[in-house]
Amino acid sequence: MLETPVITETADQLTACISIIVPRNEIMSAMGPAIHEVFATLAAQGIAPTGPWLTYHRRRPTDTFDLDVSVPIATPVTASGRVKPGKLSATKVARAVYQGNYDGLGGGWGEFCDWIDKNGLKPREDLWECYLVGPETTSDPSAWRTELNRPLADQ
């Protein structure tokens, strides 16, 4: 289920992240270890997350995903292993929240992108998902909530 999309302005957000490029069929096996590594690095440096983890995609996924597995933070992280400092820059975005199992995210994105097109908005290539409620919070996939963000080009 997709909630009604909105247009909003975001603020700059520091992140700790790991950049990965991975074939579509390997995304599930790559994200788990990456997010655990980011959280472990933050814990080792005494840095607390300021919100739920997210994935920043440099482009819409095709046969590969080109993304940063990220955690928002207030204090810059020191690069360690694959973890590096990152930043989501302030921007205008179209935003919607998808509720349900991750298997339905593709359909949620399709519905969201259709809404963007029907409203005459011009999205950029990049996008991000913020995992508000997921399997680490509840075992009920119908309660999972993923925030979909599509930055908009200047119009």
Image: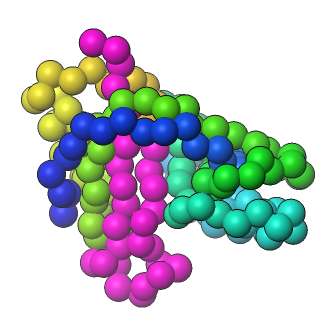
Residue 138 magenta? yes
Q: Residue at x 28, y 57 (%)?
A: 97
Q: Residue at x 35, y 73 (%)?
A: 144
Residue 9, horizontal then vertical, whole percent: 36, 36
Say above or below: 53 vs 43: above
Q: Residue at x 86, y 63 (%)?
A: 45
Say above or below: 80 vs 92: below
In-image side of 116 versus 124 (left or right): left
Say above or below: 22 vs 99: above
In-image side of 87 versus 10 (left or right): right
Residue span colored magenta? 128-155
Q: Residue at x 77, y 47 (%)?
A: 76
Toward the viewer: 122 or 60? 122
Residue 54 visible from this viewpoint: yes
Residue 127, horizontal then vertical, whole percent: 44, 37
The C terminus - image quarter: top left
Residue 152, horizontal then vertical, whole percent: 34, 26
